[in-house]
Amino acid sequence: MTDLHPATFDIAGTFTVNRIGFGAMRLADGDIWAGPSDRAGAVAVLRRAVELGVNLIDTADAYGLGANEELIAEALHPYRDDLVIVTKAGVCRPGPSLEEWIPLGRPEYLRQQAELSLRRLRLDHIDVFMLHRVDPAVPLADQVGALKQLQEEGKIRAIGLSEVDVAQIEEASTIAPIAAVQNLYNLTSRHHEAVVDHCESAGIAFMPFFPIAVGEHAKRDGGPVARVAKEIGATPAQVALAWLLHRSPVVTPIPGTTSVAHLEENVAARDVRLGDAELATLAEGI
């Protein structure tokens, strides 16, 4: 039987986080200009997450156009001492569709958004501030350099990148230490394997978003995820999260939900064991 995965990871050697965080994007499910349609429910989910030991909360200035950050402050401020807040800047949203998100990495814009995030989150510094997308129209050195300057000023503690490849991480690392990377990665979307391996070798936290996208592999009774879930007495979502935790000790999934019940199910995946046979089934079936 494979040993139980490490329970925590130290981001930048400074922030010890439990290895299932919470991605708050799903809470911005209402009008993007106004925030969640069920504000009380969203607040309850955030507070329950912290009660369950979640101490990594991920958000962005683009979620609800800032309303998501304000929601987190409403629910959780004053923050518990061990709570780590991750937020991002670097895209603008002229409309509600994800396809309408446009990279915007001009240094003055990133600085402006960091200041606004500080205000909305009611913080004097941001624990991890991430470049939401690399702007191809702006030199990466200028984008990461803006974050480095904010770090030197004490406004952010650690720097992260989102949706990047290994070459971009290596280039950014020549400008400032990179503490975290957030890419799309799950059982059925493994095109960032090289990034996971690089993060592990460099001691960089890897925060996969959309970590429970198991699709038809879970819906089919004979699919690998469904089979493993049945064999070990877990749900398909828990198997997907447990696989990520076993994939590398630097992986810290950030599943999101608007449901307290689903939140509790996700957090319980920390205790799910996958043996060598189960891992082999998942590896060969997807």
Image (tube, rainbow, N blue to C red):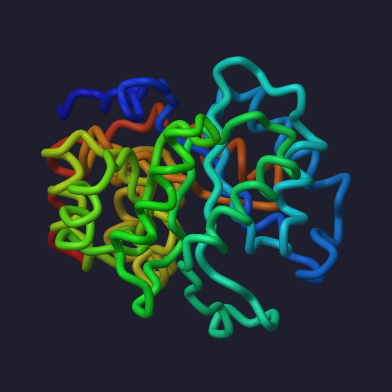
Q: Which of 14 and 194 is in front in this view?
A: 14
| Residue most extreme to the top | 81
Q: Residue 208's x, y, as percent?
A: 37, 52
What residue sits 36% from the left and 52% below the top?
145
Quadrant of the rendering where the N terminus is positioned: top left
What residue sits 48% from the left and 41% below the top?
150
Vertical arrangement, residue 47 with respect to residue 222, above or below: above
Q: Which of 144 and 12 is in front in this view?
A: 144
Q: Residue 155's x, y, as percent?
A: 55, 35
Q: 258 left or right of 202?
A: right
Q: Nearer the viewer, residue 100 or 149?
A: 149
Quadrant of the rendering where the C terminus is positioned: bottom left
Q: Nearer the viewer, residue 172 or 15?
A: 172
What residue sits 73% from the left and 31% below the top?
47
What residue sits 45% from the left and 36% below the top?
20
Q: Residue 185's x, y, as percent?
A: 32, 59
Which picture quadrant has residue 275? top left
